[in-house]
Image (cartoon, grey):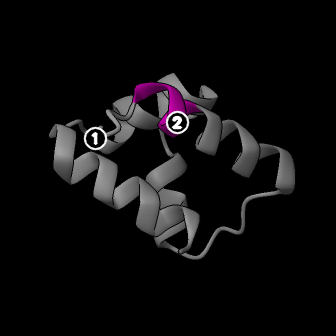
């Protein structure tokens, strides 16, 4: 699953605005917009995004 797909799922589940997600996850409010327009994130950025998602996603038990 692509990182953008993971972000979109998180945004739908939390109703968080894309700019807020980018600001909180990687300090870049344009992150989601840029990814949707074709920006390719580097390995380090993908790690930061996935770490944010893991820390803020509820896991069913």
Identify the residue at the far right of this view. 43
Is 52 left or right of 20, judged from the image as shown?
Answer: right
Is 26 left or right of 43, judged from the image as shown?
Answer: left
Q: Position of residue 18 (x, y in %)?
A: 33, 44
Report if the CB atoms under discs 2 and 1 are less than 8 Å apart.
Answer: no
Is 29 left or right of 59, judged from the image as shown?
Answer: right
Q: Nearer the viewer, residue 58 or 42?
A: 58
Disc nearest the viewer among 2 and 1: 1
Q: Position of residue 32 (x, y in %)?
A: 46, 53
Within 10 Å of disc 2 (Cα), the crowding (few <14, some 14-19, many 20+) is few
Q: Residue at x 65, y 68 (%)?
A: 39
Q: Residue at x 50, y 45 (%)?
A: 30
Is 30 rendered above or below residue 43?
A: above
Q: Position of residue 45 (x, y in %)?
A: 75, 45
Q: Residue at x 49, y 64 (%)?
A: 4
Total labels: the figure holds 2
> CA–CA distance between discs 2 and 1?
13 Å
Pointer 2 residue: 54
Secondary element at image label 1 = loop
Which quadrant is the C terminus positioned in? top left
Is 52 rendered above or below residue 9?
A: above
Q: Position of residue 14 (x, y in %)?
A: 19, 38
N-term-proximal mark, 2 vs 1: 2
Identify the residue at the far front of this view. 61
Q: Residue at x 55, y 31 (%)?
A: 52
- Magenta span: predominant SS is helix
The residue range painted magenta reads 52-56
Within 10 Å of disc 1 (Cα), the crowding (few <14, some 14-19, many 20+) is few
The circle drawn on residue 8 is none
Pointer 1 residue: 60
**Residue 44 belongs to the span the image colors magenta:** no
């Amino acid at each position: 699953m692509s990182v953008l797909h993971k972000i979109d799922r998180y945004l739908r589940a939390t109703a968080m605005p894309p700019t807020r997600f980018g600001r909180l996850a990687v300090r870049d409010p344009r992150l989601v917009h840029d990814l949707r327009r074709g920006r390719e994130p580097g390995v380090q950025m993908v790690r930061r995004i996935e770490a944010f998602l893991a820390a803020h996603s509820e896991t069913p038990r």
